[in-house]
Amino acid sequence: MPVNLKGRSLLTLRHFRAEEIQYLLDSAIEFKKLKSAGVFPKNLKNKNIALIFLKPSCRTRTSFLVAAIDEGAHLEIFPKDDIRFGIKESTKDIARVLGRLFDGIAFRGFQHSLVEEIAKYAGIPVWNGLCDMYHPTQALADLMTIKEEFGRIEKIKLTYVGDGRNNVVNSLIISSLKMGLHFSIVAPRSLLPQEDFIKQVTEETKKTEGLVRGSVEYTDDIKKGVIDSDVIYSDVWVSMGEENLIEERLALLKDYKITQKMMKLTGKPGTIFLHCMPALHDMNTEISQKYPDILEVDDDVFESTQSRVFNQAENRMHTIKALMVATI
């Protein structure tokens, strides 16, 4: 049965079937080939896209921007001071106005409930570029990068090391169960994922897909968690809005830094390293200069031949392009 995503929003991958995710990945790979060949189909000519950014961004913002221009759309960026939900105008009213004027909305902010409300009233596709609970556009780029590297997604062991309770981990849990990855989460006990969340997503996947293709496990034992990994994945230890937790996270996560020694613990010479970025891997940022122990990955891993972080960053644009074209 052909996949038709026209008019669909992407708020979380929980609402997308495996075949629909695969369709987006296949489309993104094709768009990447076309761009490399200098071919731009302009599928979004005369379309208007709004970017609402309540949180700052590098990759998400530039990925939407370049993808929109490549496909012929006009993109308008609204920073947090331009659209103040619920201050002088309700979210419901703002969403309905934007829905009359634009063809799609990309949102990046805090509460998942806010992007849900925008999608409910806008009447046009809304894409979640990050919220406190999910980061689905990042997960699509991660899956694409794994497919490019290994030629498949199913039965790849993906291991995330660090804070196991963030939006990236949540989206990778969903992706793994649907797409057949073996997902291992390695974190201190207090930062391991919520068991109830994993059970809930597992049951949802069984109901919607008829089966669960992947698996999720978690442990605080680094050696046990990373053995046989095809991919080691990391993220910053302190997310935006959590700056008051820096000292606490340093104490909890200092032993979970990605090093060459940890990469060798996988037992696989072909293990690659991924990171959703921004990454703290050297002393060239104000944060790392102030907190030298906050680096979640050593520079010799980040800059190594095993690192695919910039392929992964580029793939944000290709997957977002596929998403916009498929849903508008």
Image: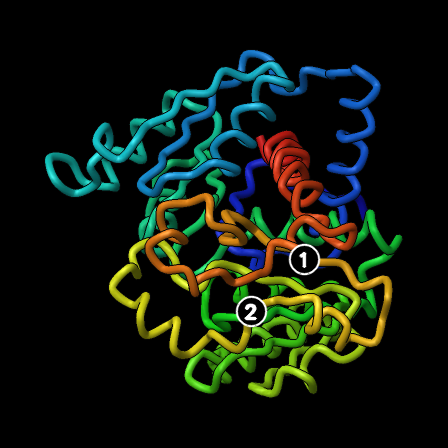
**Distance (Cα) linking label 2 and label 1:** 10 Å
- The residue wearing badge 1 is 301
Residue 2, image x, y percentages: 79, 43
- The residue wearing badge 2 is 257
> Hey, which residue is sitting farthest left in the picture?
88
Q: Nearer the viewer, residue 284 or 275?
A: 284
| Image side of residue 107 versus residue 268, left or right | left
| Image side of residue 325 versus residue 194, left or right | right
Q: Is residue 324 above or below residue 244?
A: above
Task: Look at the numbered disc 2 and give the secondary structure of its residue.
Answer: loop
Look at label 2 and name its amino acid: Lys
Q: Nearer the viewer, residue 149 or 78?
A: 149
Residue 162, image x, y percentages: 52, 70
10 Å neighbourhood of mark 2: few (<14), some, or many (≥20)? some
- Residue drawn at (33%, 55%), measured in percent from left and top? 290
Look at label 1 and name its amino acid: Val
Residue 27, numbered circle: none
Quarter assignment of residue 258: bottom right
